[in-house]
Image (cartoon, rainbow, N blue to C red):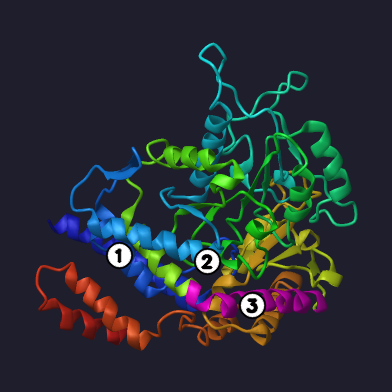
Amino acid sequence: MAELESKIRNLLDRTIIDNNWRQKECINLIPSESTPSLLVKMCEISDPAGRYAEHRTLKGKEVYFYQATDFIRDVEEEARRELKEYFGCNNIELRPVSGNMANEVVFKGIVKFLNREKSKEQPFRKMRSVINNDLTKGGHLSAQPMGALFNFVDDNPETGKENVYHFPVQKNNPYKTDTTQLEELINIVKPELIIFGKSMFIYREPVQFVADIVRRMSPRPIIMYDMAHVLGLYGAFQSPFAEGADVVTGSTHKTFFGPQRGIVAGNMGADTGLDKLWIEIKSRAFPGSTSNHHLGTLLGLLLASYEMNHFKQELQTQIIKNARAFARALNDMGMTVEGDPADGFTETHQVILRVRQYGSAEDIARRLEDNNIITNYQALPDDGSFIGSSGLRTGTQEMTRFGMKEKDFEQLAGYIADCVKANKPVKAEVTKFRQRFLDMQYCLPADKSIGLAAQVIASMLPGNEYLDRFADNLRKFI
């Protein structure tokens, strides 16, 4: 027992050190991360975290295959309602446990949908062709043949590779689509699926433009938007369903500040001709891709959805304003900011820096980390590979939630410029700077959430006599 206790103590000591460093000393700018609120975290570790609630639609009725699932059934139904409100859509599938899985569920569903009327004699076919964003131009890995798209697209007999084509980009701005060339490409390759969305994401996607083109096609391509990186900006940044998208996928833990899992949203009523596609997507979620769909994080997602729907407009507006102020300040300090200055460099939470003139992006990212500024290195469109990357990818979403405003990001830009351009140590200044931003915003304030958190913890302990002790200890550390 002593050995076990020693191992546990060692691990927890290291965990506390990391928690304190990341949450109290660092400025986190990685655009694909966020810190959930205390109450979301409490939901994640609650009793449902160890339970199952498999279910599927059979003969028009939702059938659950485990007992004692009434609570989590109600949670899932309520989460669907909250997220339908958030997206303004008809369909929500919550069982994917990551954004990558959400994409794979859609790809599987589309292939099943395309084969719905084949005879027994006909072979089961894949998608004939797909258009997506090139990985080296900021496209997301999960929408590539090496990712979730693997084995769902026909091979091109001339190239021996998957029949996947990339959005053409503008010569003077590789972060924007060349719509003239895109229209030509669509008419030539006649894709069955068009996938919008990126991981290096600073501009809107031409959804409305494409929807107007494919409306004339029969059969028309399915329009999908992987919003993993901008899901929390839905509406303020772009509203794909209003522009003609059929399905939206994403991660729920990046700009959408919930737990780590995935989502599929759709607008596929009977009038669209895609209602059967939604049935296939649901069946690929379960039993096609998941069994246990991580009920603790599902509970946390519902609470995060309450928060997001309540603070949506205020939060989204501030995230984008902060990103533009951050980009302008970095540019004014002589840093090379990607994107067009006339567009404010960015329309999202992301700000992309070119740092190759100061060393490899990997080395610059490590230098910033050593100074308590967390970014990630990124291949830029002219790099061609992530090896020897030229760029840094940053995002304003997490620190916006901790209360940073435009002037604060301008001050942060100064620390970054000093560290990157002059190799000046700024760790002490950054650590002191972070002390101003320790209280999470856009959620219940600490004086209300701590008591609720203590009650959740007490409900998982053998006796309620632990409640006061836990609450007292919690208050000491807050």
Camera-near label (3 vs 1) is: 3
Disc 2 crowd, CA 10 A, few/some/many (<14, 14-19, 20+): some
Quote the CA–CA distance across marks 3 and 1: 38 Å
* Image x and y of residue 143, in percent: 62, 42
Q: Which of marks 2 and 3 is nearer the N terminus?
A: 2
| Residue shown at the point (41%, 49%) measured from the top left | 95
For the residue labelled by badge 3, is the local secondary structure a helix, a strand or a loop?
A: helix
Q: Does 210 appear above or below 413? A: above
Image-based side of 420 in relation to 225, left or right? right
Residue to which mark 3 is pinned: 317
Q: Does 365 appear above or below 99? A: below
Magenta residues, as a range?
309-332
Residue to which mark 1 is pinned: 12
| Residue shown at the point (54%, 49%) measured from the top left | 269
For the residue labelled by badge 1, is the local secondary structure a helix, a strand or a loop?
A: helix
Which residue type carries mark 2?
Tyr
Residue 478 visible to the viewer: no
Quote the CA–CA distance across marks 2 and 3: 15 Å
Image-based side of 21 in relation to 380, left or right? left
For the residue labelled by badge 2, is the local secondary structure a helix, a strand or a loop?
A: helix
Image-based side of 452 in relation to 313, left or right? left
Of the 4 image quadrants, the one containing the N terminus is bottom left
Residue to which mark 2 is pinned: 86
* Image x and y of residue 347, in percent: 73, 68
* Image x and y of residue 175, in percent: 79, 56
Disc 1 crowd, CA 10 A, few/some/many (<14, 14-19, 20+): few
Q: Which of marks 3 and 1 is nearer the N terminus?
A: 1
Q: Earlier in the sequence, mark 1 or mark 2?
A: 1
